[in-house]
Image (tube, coloured by chain):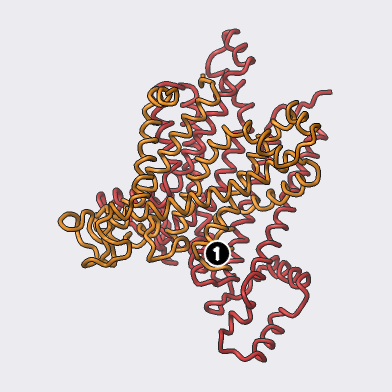
Amino acid sequence: MSLLKELLRAPLSAKFGLLVIVVYILVALFAPVLAPFGETQVVGEGFAPWGGQFLLGTDNLGRDMFSRLVFGARNTLGIAFLTTVLAFLLGGTCGLIAAIKGGWVDQGLSRVVDILMAIPQLIFALLILSVVGTTATSLVLVIALLDATRVFRLSRAVAMNVVVQDFVEAARLRGEGLCWLVTREVLPNAAAPLIAEFGLRFCFVFLFISALSFLGLGIQPPTADWGSMVRDNAVLITFGDISPLLPALAVALITVSVNFVVDWMLHKSSGLKEC
Amino acid sequence: MKSIFKLLGQRLALGLLSLLAVSVIIFLAVGLLPGDIAQAMLGQSATPETVAAYRAQLGLDLPPLTRFGQWIWQLLHGDLGVSLANQRPIAELVGSRLGNTFSLALLAALVSVPLALLLGMLAALYRNSWFDRLLNTSALSAVSFPEFFVAYILILVFAVKLNWFPSISNLSPNASLGEVLERSVLPVATLSLVVIAQMMRMTRASLINLLASPYIEMARLKGISQSRIIFRHALPNALAPIVNVVALNLAYLVVGVVVVEVVFVYPGLGQLLVDSVAKRDIPVVQACSLIFAATYILLNTSADVLSIASNPRLMHPKG
């Protein structure tokens, strides 16, 4: 009940953000029910106007725009979520272990991360994708690896503050193993900043994948995906038609919403009022 | 004063070291290719003898360390290798595009840095007013928009509806300066919007932190005028973080240019990179990545160096 009360007292921007996130998740889950046509089904002439049989018209190949938007939620959100989870598993685990073990483990991992972070992410991703080819699997793995470096930095920094506490020392002296130290001692005390970071990282990954797809190097056709939908229909904009902007708007809306919610969460957990 | 030179030396050495590490990674990336580059260039139908001869010609039969040395040596002499797609020297492909990309980034920087600093300072001074809230919310939104969204909105409004600027920025080699500038307006505006939001937020945050510190309150209690507090007491101490933010965002600009160039069909390095990735033209990708990564490292290192050099506390070490 206290959670509900907390939600009711949230600022308008956070409420709006939460609402949008819930709607997106529902759309992603029930995509096949909501969409009137199939994801890759060609249903009519290319670039049909809005209204009538096709709510938002059709795209360059004559596929229903609205259906593809709905399926795009599932594909784009799903891949971005999977990537973020992978990045957190890899980066978070390494960060916590580096903080607990210290010494050469910490030094080694930190230097590798330093080097990986010295290359701009987009450039690194393009370099690797040009070598291994652009498939969904390599996309997820490459971006997860690159993003894990950021997660590593944060989780190591947060865990560093926890491992010097007495209760961790006590657990060490009891002879608890690494697994216990990570999951029972450090993680519960480092959870709040990590959850907020998850939201920010998700936004970043989401924008990153959309940008790559927009460049034609991300999620490959015929899978419906917001970034490549903008690219495929961009020519319509020069005729003053806004339908290619809808997938871009969908991307913008979810990232703004997540940012609003994270902003509110950080504000709550820090407990300080900005003076 | 000694410690500051030591710090600066360390940063510079670190920058050089990461440059070396990055070039090793970019060099090694080719090794991940199934088969090798000779096979890729000659295609599937080549006989094993031709491939072997070609490998010898390219020097692929030499040990990796020697090849790395040669690669770096050639790079330093401006020889970037040959494109797989059309056999032209990469230096020729990169040449004019490099200038285009840097001038785009430079123009964006010239527009965005003064504007962002001014807005950040105003937001910090009038914090929690409606002006500050408006700036903050729009900055948060601008940060979360994908660049291509911003770009297409600008195209829709200024190129299609109002017809003020061209929607495509392809430059002909003999375009006049005025024409180049006119065609660069929309790409520069897109880049600036994204960077201004970030820089403004960070300027505001670092100034607010400072204005809450005891020595500012002391100055205020002494009855010093508001402008003197800002320019004599707060700004010198805020300079280090602000310089850092500016340099980091310039580094971001150099990379953010890639998407914007593709949207506006601007003949820059980013577009070459994207095309080459799609064609899997690895030597060109290598050359472009190296140029982007080197610029990025250079800017990041200068951010560190400048923030050390502009920190008044390091200029007067205790004891």
Q: Which chain is red?
A: B
Asked whether, in this view, residue A114 is left or right of residue A21, the answer is: right
Asked whether, in this view, residue A101 is left or right of residue B261, the answer is: right
Residue B155 is at least partly visible in this image:
no
Q: Mark 1 belongs to which subunit?
A: A
On screen, residue B140 above or below B148: above
Q: Nearer the viewer, residue A178 or B165?
A: A178
Q: Residue A183's image quarter? A: top right
Q: Nearer the viewer, residue B56 or A25?
A: A25
On screen, residue B226 above or below B285: above
Q: Residue A269's image quarter? A: top right
Q: Colour of chain A?
A: orange
Residue A254 x %, y %: 40, 43
Residue B40 x %, y %: 59, 79
What residue sits 38% from the left and 54% below the top? B182
Residue A241 x %, y %: 24, 55
On screen, residue A146 above or below B281: above
Q: Nearer the viewer, residue A27 or A112?
A: A27
Q: Residues within 10 Å of mark 1 (few under 14, many from 20)?
A: many
Q: Which residue is label 1 attached to?
A: A129
Q: Residue B25's image quarter? A: bottom right
Residue A25 is at least partly visible in this image:
yes
Secondary element at tag 1? helix
What residue sits 55% from the left and 64% below the top? A129
What residue sits 71% from the left and 53% below the top? B18
On screen, residue B115 above or below A218: above
